[in-house]
DNA sequence: CTTACCGCCTGTCGGC
DNA sequence: TGCCGACAGGCGGTAA
């Protein structure tokens, strides 16, 4: 489900709902694990701690208190809701109750998500190997060009590799490559300096536009306010196989690249 | 080291 | 109507 724009919108919606500054009262675990075990440290350590910061790193959401950081990954189907009542729905796995009566509930049907507690300043296994943030100034065409030298993997796999650059998933990889005019199967090392510059720029643009549109809702993405995104209506290639390219009129193609459905325009992309 | 594939889960959809 | 396989915004482990 969620790529960088969706996680960024979850972060912003949590901020808007006013949970920052609130103090945790108790934690309820409704099952023992997601992708990894739901540690008892959550129930033991969080009560009395105040939520000081709500941040995004890559596709992770970081909820930090004085002493801890809750590291949350939404996987394919994870979502956070802010509730005042106690009504739980199917696949609600964790409830974080504040003293105010509000609570944060993590729901995840497929349970590919992660929810773990770490000491605030400590490094942890989820964040330590992540690559550069694509919206940061450090990520640019020259850096991408250098990083791709000698790499034989397809450029789409490269930009989806979270050790290289973070936040880009299956949707925005196809969309950025279309905008840059580069075919997904091109080996990373074969990109020219100009193509690397175009691709870095395209990644930034598509992510920023998607953030502004509230993300993409194909099936079940919602921000923590229950609102859907609208960027799916502006996809130029993703999920549009067989349709005409809006730029050149050629028929958009699709195929599987390392197991992921991939979309491109055979005329606009080389 | 890099790269490709499998498996983890549930829900939904299309074909028969 | 139901059953079955394929597929879905991700990613870690493993094998080559």
Image (cartoon, coloured by chain):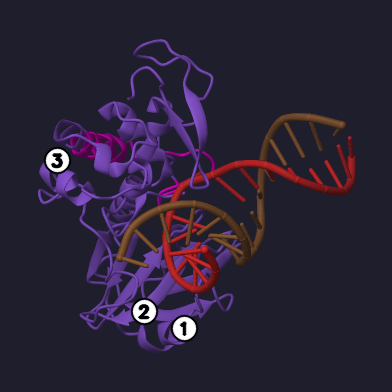
Chain colours: A purple, B brown, C red
Q: Are marks 2 and 1 in contact (CB under 8 Å)?
A: yes
Residue named by callout 3: A141
Mark 1 lies on a secondary structure that is loop
Residue named by callout 2: A117
Which residue shows up at 37% across the image and 49% down it?
Answer: A3
Do the residues indicated by labels 2 and 3 lie within the same chain of the protein? Answer: yes
Residues rendered magenta in the picture: A199-226
Give the number of the mark in front: 3 or 1. 3
A266 sits to left or right of A136: right
Looking at marks 2 and 1 on the same chain, the residue that comes earlier in the sequence is marked by 1
User: Is A124 located above or below residue A15 in the figure?
Assistant: below
Disc 3: host chain: A
Mark 2 lies on a secondary structure that is strand
Do the residues indicated by labels 3 and 1 lie within the same chain of the protein? Answer: yes
Disc 1: host chain: A
Which residue shows up at 38% across the image and 33% down it?
Answer: A231
- Residue A87, given in percent of the width and then of the height, sits at 58, 63
């Amino acid at each position: 489900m969620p790529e960088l724009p969706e996680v960024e919108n979850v972060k912003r919606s949590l901020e808007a709902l006013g949970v920052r500054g609130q103090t945790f009262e108790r934690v309820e675990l409704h099952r023992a694990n997601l992708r990894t075990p739901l540690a008892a440290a959550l129930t033991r350590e969080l009560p009395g701690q105040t939520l000081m910061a709500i941040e995004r790193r890559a596709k992770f959401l970081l909820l930090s208190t004085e002493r801890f950081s809750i590291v949350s990954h939404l996987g394919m189907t994870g979502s956070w809701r802010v509730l005042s009542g106690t009504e739980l729905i199917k696949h609600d796995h964790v409830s974080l109750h504040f003293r105010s009566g509000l609570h944060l509930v993590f729901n995840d049907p497929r349970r590919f998500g992660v929810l773990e507690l770490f000491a605030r300043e400590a490094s942890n296994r989820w964040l330590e190997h992540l690559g550069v943030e694509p919206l940061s100034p450090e990520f640019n065409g020259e850096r991408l060009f250098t990083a791709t030298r000698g790499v034989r993997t397809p450029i789409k796999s490269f930009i989806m590799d979270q050790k290289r650059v973070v936040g880009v998933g299956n949707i925005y990889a196809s969309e950025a490559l279309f905008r840059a005019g580069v075919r997904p199967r091109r080996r990373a090392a074969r990109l020219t300096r100009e193509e690397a510059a175009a691709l870095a720029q395209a990644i930034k643009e598509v992510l920023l536009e998607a953030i502004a549109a509230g993300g993409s809702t194909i099936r079940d993405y919602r921000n923590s306010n229950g609102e859907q995104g609208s960027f799916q209506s502006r996809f130029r290639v993703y999920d549009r196989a067989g349709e005409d390219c809006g730029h050149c009129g050629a028929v958009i193609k699709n195929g599987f690249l390392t197991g992921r459905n991939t979309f491109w325009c055979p005329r606009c992309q080389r």
